[in-house]
Amino acid sequence: SGRWAKAAAIVKELEEKCGTPIGKLRQVADAMAVEMHAGLASEGGSKLKMIISFVDNLPTGDEKGLFYALDLGGTNFRVLRVQLGGKDNRVAKQEFEEVSIPPHLMVGTSDALFDFIAAALKKFVDTEGEDSHLSPGRQRELGFTFSFPVKQSSIAAGTLIKWTKGFSIEDAVGQDVVGELTKAMERVGLDMRVAALVNDTIGTLAGGRYDNPDVIAAVILGTGTNAAYVERAHAIPKWHGLLPKSGDMVINMEWGNFRSSHLPLTGIYDQAMDVESLNPGEQIFEKLISGMYLGEILRRVLCRMAEEAAFFGDTIPPKLKIPFILRTPDMSAMHHDTSSDLRVVGSKLKDILEIPNTSLKTRKLIVELCDIISVRGARLSAAGILGILKKLGRDTVREEEKQRSVIALDGGLYEHYTKFREAMESTLKELLGEASDTIVIEHSNDGSGVGAALLAASHSQYL
Ligand code: ADP
Ligand code: MG
């Protein structure tokens, strides 16, 4: 019928506009490498901020003592206590707690957010057992993972550049987030020193390196997306400090803000979503790839199909009009539905969008949409990784030095969206060709928390 023809035309158009043939991915990777150079050359030289992290030494395994970590950067935050036992005992003990952030605090005031965090941290510290070995007379020390763009001024200080991922707390922008946390800890009566301020990519890189010395980069695919990698300090023209002894400097790319004319952006879905977002014009790469947005893109496509092809009947299901009602985990559940009647798709449509009694044909089409949208994101993230490898000259096999490059990956999207992960990994293989034997992707399961604790240890005031 006419309806199906229209619906099929919308799907076909989406498929074409979201296409990521290998040649296009190479252009994206090249553009990424070019922007990396530009961002390292001068402050503000690129959409890629290429933030200098002040981490010039990654964990060695010698780290010892009791350390805390706090991970803030999405819908949940985690507090972590780690007993580090040096080369022999490694991570001797690890305890953590996860607390979800009430949505009103994500758009409130800086004090309200940090008071909430400090109070939760204090509660956690109070559960410290007899077996935790804080050396007598010592102040507790914390690695603070704060996964928003920060202009770092030392290993333990940095001002917030902007919020992302649905956070919007005006009075915190431009503030030193370590200062904000420290003041809040004082207000709740918690005596603790922030020894290192990092983000999740740097935490993951540190945790990954602790487990495997070949780790050279980390990528997060979660609510948002970002990457960090180890750069040679002399290849950072904008760095005017002393050359670190190691010769290395970890760079927080903030790659979510990457954009390029080569990105397959659709006007009606991607650009419209961007314009209506909390941060229009920003985080364009992130909006194509990450967990916060994939479900919302799907909702927008379904909405258009309802409006222009009467895809769900003569009326437009009212729930379908609500931004962000369709979350990426729900999209992922539909995408992975293996039942013959696609009953997971049916029940998601019924439960979330209040669309009952969908036909198998309708459900099949929706699975196809999930595939188009997630595969585009997955392939673009693979292109981003190729960009990093190109910048480091590790994208080709060099006979002299059979170097292995390991990339630590983490984040809920990578971890739980199997089809996304598989598409990303197979695309990277395809892009690398024969060099793919020397490049390894490793899941760093919550390495970012332990990584932050390790960096707190290596920047302890008692060393
Ligand atoms: P954050 O990025 O907020 O620090 P995570 O790394 O745990 O936290 O990632 C959470 C994100 O991962 C969610 O916002 C969601 O987009 C995505 N996610 C979680 N579970 C799934 C799932 N089953 N399928 C697809 N995406 C998921
Ligand atoms: Mg995270």
Image (cartoon, rainbow, N blue to C red):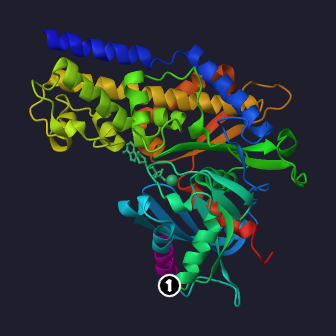
User: Residue 244, image x and y in percent?
Assistant: 87, 54
Question: Looking at the image, can residue 31 be seen?
Answer: yes
Give the quarter of the image for residue 68. bottom right
Relative vertical location of residue 76 with respect to residue 410 in this rendering, above or below: below
Q: Is residue 106 left or right of residue 54?
A: left
Question: Looking at the image, can residue 219 be seen?
Answer: no
Residue closest to the eye, 172 or 118: 172
Identify the residue at horizontal 20%, vertical 43% (top origin): 352
Q: Is residue 76 magenta?
A: no
Q: Is residue 123 magenta?
A: yes
User: Residue 389, image x and y in percent?
Assistant: 70, 32
The magenta stretch spans which residues?
A: 117-125
Relative vertical location of residue 34 with respect to residue 44 in this rendering, above or below: above
Identify the residue at horizontal 43%, vertical 59% (top origin): 106
Identify the residue at horizontal 53%, vertical 53% (top origin): 445
Q: Report the residue marked by disc 1.
A: 126
- For mark 1, does the 10 Å Cα neighbourhood hold few (<14), some (14 to 19), or many (20 or more) residues? few
User: Residue 342, image x and y in percent?
Assistant: 20, 31
Q: Where's the N terminus, which quadrant?
A: top left
User: Residue 412, image x and y in percent?
Assistant: 45, 47
Disc 1 is placed on an element classified as: loop
Give the quarter of the image for residue 37. top right
Name of the residue lying farthest toward the front: 171
Name of the residue lying farthest toward the bottom: 137
Amino acid type, residue under disc 1 in the picture: Asp
Residue closest to the eye, 16 or 451: 16
Q: Is residue 255 left or right of residue 290?
A: right
Residue closest to the eye, 442 or 39: 39
Give the main secondary structure of the magenta stretch. helix
Q: Where's the C terminus, which quadrant?
A: bottom right
Relative vertical location of residue 365 with respect to residue 245 in this rendering, above or below: above
Identify the residue at horizontal 16%, vertical 37% (top origin): 318
